[in-house]
Image: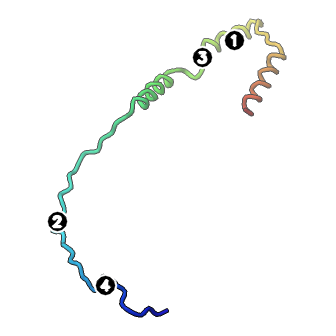
Amino acid sequence: MKIWGDIPKIPGIYDRQQNVKKINGTPAAVSRKDELSISGQAKDYQAVLRALKNVPDIRQDKVDELSEKYGSGSYDISGRDIADKIIKSVIDRKV
């Protein structure tokens, strides 16, 4: 397709040159020290973790009590109770 005639302002845009100013320098960078801040929630978690580390994994008083009952022959649990606990633990894992 050929367009006859002069399209206004098009030649003026391409013929014009613009001056670009040079940058003489950049502002000096200010150095700052790194800073660390811990939220209140994180401090609470740290306190709880420290407290949990002091709690023993084995409750020795319960172990001693059950050992004494078993040793004396007074430790008696029905098979139905054991079966109920096993079924409950299986159901809880699936959910």
Q: Residue at x 74, y 6 (%)?
A: 72
Q: Whole-Å distance between the Cαs marked 1 and 2?
A: 81 Å
Q: Residue at x 48, y 27 (%)?
A: 49
The residue lying toward the viewer, choosing from 13 and 86, is 13
Mark 4 against mark 3, which lies toward the viewer? 4
Residue 24 falls in which quadrant of the image? bottom left
Amino acid, disc 1: Leu
Residue occupied by mark 3: 59
What x and y, as percent, mark residue 28? 18, 57
Q: Residue at x 21, y 55 (%)?
A: 29
Residue occupied by mark 2: 25
What's the mark number on residue 66?
1
Disc 2 is placed on an element classified as loop
Residue occupied by mark 4: 14
What x and y, as percent, mark residue 18? 23, 78
Q: Whole-Å distance between the Cαs marked 4 and 2?
A: 31 Å
Q: Earlier in the sequence, mark 1 or mark 2?
A: 2
Q: Where is 72 relative to 48, above or below?
A: above
In the picture, measured across the screen, residue 58 lies left or right of residue 52, that is: right
Disc 4 is placed on an element classified as helix
In the picture, measured across the screen, residue 60 lies left or right of residue 42, that is: right
Q: Earlier in the sequence, mark 1 or mark 4?
A: 4
